[in-house]
């Protein structure tokens, strides 16, 4: 009996040690959960998040809250099991968040860069909505290029073959839409006067070009800055753009409500899809949001992960979002997912 008791004891001890080992080994997964939400009309660390100088700003009775996803990068069995059984969390393969060949630090650095780019695009889209168009200006004309003696530094390029130039990216796309050697009708403004010129594109580096270096500008008579750290990724663009407009326009976009949302935004105001919509909906609900602005391409996923009492408004552009909020303030029913 004594030998048998020792055997049982050793077996139990070995099982316990194995269990501890299994529980402590990191798994190739991450846990996604609701992250913090931030009112873009509010403050962070005692400073306004959207800062405007040189022009009066308005205040709102409600809030415009961007939403985030919290990532638990190191996951052990206990956390994975808890995440799999949680309604608010998701356990996903690690490579979906941290691609192979990239360190956690590299991914986080890229997320910071994406966040900064989203702020720039939010400013561009919002200012365009407020009547400050983007100007694509000729910085230099390449010697020997097709635009020599046709375009000049300082010219603002306005169209290509009667299609409006709304950004530097748009200009490049219009030029590349036709093969090298095409005669393009370039609209421009020089010293305040409109004009047109014919420029025949040439192939350079395998692509059609017109031989100018350009600079994108958006003149406006005030200073605008977004000051918010500790958040990464591009998905705050829509809520930043709405916050800028709300600050600069007298109308209260919120109607006194807490409005939450998410979505990337480009310079032309198009709203793109994001990840972690289920977790962002949870965060919005916990923050007291009354509606949630959902990128159109995320609607199906959002409908699979509803939060009771949180209507989902479908938006594909900044203009869609503004119209939805206007309809909401008027007591109407905006388009839903």
Image (cartoon, rainbow, N blue to C red):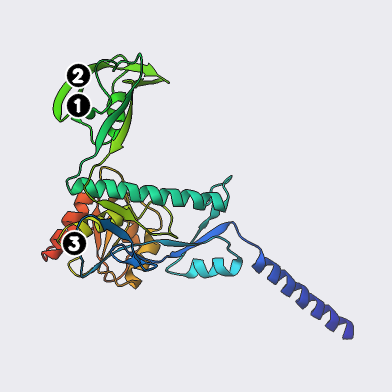
Task: Answer with left or right where residue 155 lies relative to residue 142.
Answer: left
From the viewer's perspective, is the residue at label 3 or at label 1 nearer?
1
Quarter of the image that includes the C terminus: bottom left
Residue 53, image x, y percentages: 26, 56
Residue at image x 23%, y 32%?
Answer: 165
Residue 114, image x, y percentages: 42, 48
SS label for mark 3:
loop
Residue at numbered disc 1 = 188
Residue at numbered disc 2 = 197
Give the CA separation, mark 2 to mark 1.
8 Å
Pointers 3 and 1 in contact (CB under 8 A)? no
Q: Could you say which is closer to the camera, residue 175 or residue 245?
A: 245
First reached walking from the N terminus: tag 3 or tag 1 = 1
SS label for mark 1:
strand
Residue at image x 58%, y 63%?
Answer: 75
Residue 332, image x, y percentages: 12, 63
Q: Looking at the image, can residue 334 be seen? A: no
Residue at numbered disc 3 = 253
Residue at image x 17%, y 64%?
Answer: 252
């Amino acid at each position: 009996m004594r030998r048998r008791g020792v055997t049982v004891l050793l077996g139990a001890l070995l099982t316990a040690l194995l269990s501890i080992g299994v529980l402590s080994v990191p798994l190739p997964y991450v846990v996604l959960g609701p992250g913090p939400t931030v009112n873009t009309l509010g403050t962070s660390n005692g400073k306004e998040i959207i800062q405007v100088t040189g022009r009066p700003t308005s205040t709102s009775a409600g809030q415009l809250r961007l939403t985030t996803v919290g990532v638990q990068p190191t996951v052990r069995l206990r956390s994975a099991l808890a995440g799999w059984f949680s309604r608010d969390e998701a356990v996903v393969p690690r490579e979906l968040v941290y691609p192979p060949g990239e360190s956690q630090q590299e991914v986080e650095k890229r997320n910071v860069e994406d966040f900064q780019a989203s702020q720039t695009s939010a400013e561009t889209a919002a200012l365009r909505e407020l009547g400050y168009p983007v100007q694509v200006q000729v910085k230099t004309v390449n010697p020997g290029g097709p635009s020599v003696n046709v375009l000049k530094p300082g010219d603002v390029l306005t169209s290509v073959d009667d299609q409006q130039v709304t950004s530097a990216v748009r200009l490049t796309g219009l030029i590349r839409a036709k093969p090298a050697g095409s005669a393009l009708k370039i609209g421009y403004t020089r010293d305040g006067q409109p004009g047109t010129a014919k420029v025949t594109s040439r192939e350079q580096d395998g692509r059609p070009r017109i031989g100018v270096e350009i600079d994108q500008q958006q003149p406006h008579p005030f200073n605008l800055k977004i000051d918010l750290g500790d958040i990464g990724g591009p998905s705050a663009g829509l809520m930043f753009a709405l916050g800028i407009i709300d600050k600069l326009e007298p109308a209260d976009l919120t109607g006194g409500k807490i409005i939450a949302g998410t979505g990337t935004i480009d310079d032309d105001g198009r709203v793109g899809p994001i990840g972690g919509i289920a977790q962002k909906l949870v965060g919005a609900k916990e923050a007291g949001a009354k509606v949630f602005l959902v990128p159109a391409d995320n609607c199906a996923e959002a409908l699979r992960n509803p939060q009771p009492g949180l209507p989902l408004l479908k938006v594909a552009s900044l203009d869609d979002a503004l119209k939805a909020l206007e309809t909401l303030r008027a007591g109407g029913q905006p388009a839903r997912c």
